[in-house]
Image (cartoon, grey):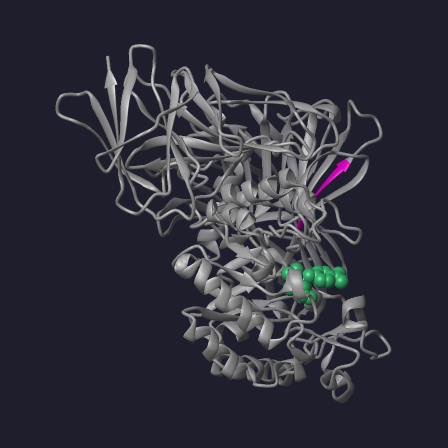
Amino acid sequence: MPIHSQCCTIDVTDKSIELSNNVVRVKFDTLLGTISLLNSQNNTPIFSNAYILIHTGRGVLDSREMTYKAFSGLDFKEGNLRGKSVVIRTEDANRRNEMSIKLTVLEGVPGYTCVIRFGNLDEETEVSAIDSLVLDVMPNAPPSIGQDRSNLRYFRNGFQSWDLSLSVPVSDGRNTSHLYSTINSIESDETYLVGYITSSNMFSTVQILGAEDEKEGLKQILASCNVDDISVTTRDSIVSEEMLFLTGINSVRLTEIYMDLLATKMDAISWKNIPTGWCSWYFYYTMPDEQEIVDNTRFLAERFGDSIEWIQIDDGFQEAVGDWEENSRFASGLDELVEEIHRKGYKAGIWTAPFVASEHSDIFKDHPDWFIRDKNNLPIAVDQNPLWLGNYYALDLTNPIVIEHIEKIFEKMKKSGFEYFKIDFLYHAAHQGRRVNTNMTRAQAVRRGLETIRNIVGNDLILGCGAPLGVSIGITNMMRIGTDIATDWRYDWGGGVYECAINTITRSPMHNRLWINDPDCILVRQDDNNLTIEEVRLWLSVVAVSGGAVLLSDRMMDVSEGRLRIVDKVLPPYGKGGIPVDAHLYEEPRVFAVPVESPIGYWSVVAVVNLTEEKIDVSFGLEDAGLSEKIPHHVFSFWDSEYLGLYEDEVVIEDLKPHSCRLLTVKPSSSLPTIMSTSIHFTQGAIELNNLEWSSDGKELSVRVKMDTKSRESVSFVFNNDWTPLKAFINDVETDIQEIAPEVISVRERFKSGDIIRIKFQR
Ligand code: 9PG
């Protein structure tokens, strides 16, 4: 009896309940208690005989050992998502446990989702985990992506902001990713994406088990929610997070679909623009003082004016981590400092680590019982930080007194006039241990802490840092998605350009979906900097292409004008996120592309980076960079103002030096002359140019410059050999033409907003 809706169908036989859309068919076998997935067009299997487990205090419930009882089908509609769900009710033989399985297929989504409910019909018991998908790989029925480990990679997403997240080979044993993972074939990019699209209540992982034999190297795919042994009383129930399984070619595209669904389900929020500003940390570290902050603010106001917005005070203003009153370096008080920041035309931000406290803080000394404890009821030192001179502890966010304490901290900060809250070291609040309320999962505890802060600060900006990602969605406007930047390529205790660049590229699908990504600050100082100018440009290029926040963190007064001009080129942020073109092929991604659309045309800006220690050749397909393969494209290299030529199908960059980057503009060729590039802004035309027009006689091309430049900059034009440039004018004054290549010319000027450039051509 098939039940049709426009997009999705439910089919029920005496052996199975099937749910399909035009891509997949998910089948629950009512006799075996297993789930199989098929291609709905040709009925070929994607995987077979997966099952579900619930780990309880009285043993493991296995869907294959449960008895099918009943099902109900329903239409699913939420926002613009439409589909069909079935809820399948099963019970064990002695009727102590119920397992309900809700499967959903959505219109246009190449996969299905699954929610599990455990119903307790017997005495109170604990639940430690719910496995939404257990897929044992059988050599006689391999999954559609194959099982040859040498052809497979998986994406290992870290639990929190700072964790290195990248695509790696499946090694033998357990390979764990948090929240989601992709498993893709290197050859074909055939991919499974397994991930959770809700994440408020339970932390989740995707694990891939590798066998020793590489050829039969894939043993199991396992998606689990961690339920932290919370108790379920008699007649009560507990519901898992919703898992999504996607299948198809193109791992990057599937990741984008996943992030879109996760954002929708979690009511993700963003911000009215892409934040820009200055942060005290990466110059002053734990020793900022009010005068230095005022001096930087004054300098920034003069040099950058309103092209930045925020002055954010970081760690070091406070008495101790945990005691958030200002210390003696801030003798005039935070309220006064905020006013001074306002007088200079900026808004003020402040850092806290609101869920932890150092061993030196009064709060820790006075209230050891407010912290997560071990089995002897002693507070657990969750970590130590040499900069904080010792151990620190994590607050028990299930304790209402602790929640009140956090409310007071943020009430005070908000009253001081701060409108931007960088909340840091959040993941420690998820530490295992004793809490007062044993009915909350660790994820729920963290979520409650985050919601508390959101409630107090209202619609102000919250930047999560050191944050468990899934549970922060819908609460933080912005999120650090990588480790700490440093004036080093790789810093001894983690951080630096290398790791920051990897995460900024690999986690770019989160940007503008889950929140605004914060890749961390850009550092351009010329002194006391172990980064070469190529490394500085590489990091700026990656940040720029990411579309994320642009935050400075030098002692700005000491930065040379030459170095400040590099910053001008990435302000304002373009905002649209980059495509991590080959992030599922290499540990060290190479190609990061952002398609640009503007009134003067469309093109892609592509950061080609070499994060390895060897010279490499890098290539990418035009289509992968968001362009059409059908037209040859001009390629221009931004930092070195070099025209690289016309490319068909793919762009190849040979002999790219280690730690270097080429920031390319890749633009469709045409029969008419057009803009090639500018040295003003990294988008090379989207922000700084408009009104590209031909004169009525078709001989003169003109374009308007939209911003003042700090120095002489160039605007370049490209044409084919039907055309010869004759003369160039800026506001009717003739100017020199520089030949960059036989088909590329440029004009140079210190431009004023409103300047019109005209080039007279002969055909
Ligand atoms: C302030 C800093 C900055 C920075 C944050 C975060 O493991 N550790 O000891 C460790 C120290 C500092 C750190 C991360 C880890 O950096 O990312 O932007 O706000 O705190 O202390």
- Of all residues, the one furthest to the left in this rendering is 696
**Residue 443, horizontal then vertical, whole percent:** 63, 64
The region drawn magenta spans 205-209
Q: State ligand 1's quadrant.
A: bottom right
Of residues 431 and 206, the one drawn nearer to the viewer in this rendering: 431
Residue 283, percent from left and from top: 66, 62
Q: Position of residue 636 (x, y in %)?
A: 47, 26
Residue 531, by quadrant, is: top right
525 or 357, which is in the foreground? Answer: 525
Residue 631 appears in the picture as rendered? yes
Q: In the rendered image, which quarter is residue 221 located in?
A: top right
Q: Residue furthest top?
A: 722
* Residue at point 60%, 39% (across, down): 538
Dominant secondary structure (helix, strand or loop) of the stretch shown in magenta: strand
Describe residue 55's horizontal placement relative to residue 44 as left or right: right
Task: Give the position of the C terminus as an image quadrant.
Answer: top left
Query: Which quadrant is home to the N terminus?
Result: top left
Toward the bottom, the furthest residue is 366
Reply yes or no: does residue 208 show up in magenta. yes
The number of callouts visible is 0
| Residue at 72% across, 82% down | 370
Of residue 442 and residue 553, the one placed in the foreground of this image is: 553
Establish if 370 lies above or below 685.
Answer: below
Task: Kindly identify the residue that appears in the image at 82 percent across and 74 percent down.
Answer: 374
Q: Residue at x 56, y 48 (%)?
A: 563
Q: Is residue 189 above or below residue 429?
A: above
Q: Is residue 89 magenta?
A: no
Q: Is residue 185 left or right of residue 86?
A: right
Residue 511 rendering spot, x and y as whole percentages:
50, 48
Nearer the observer, 638 or 218: 638
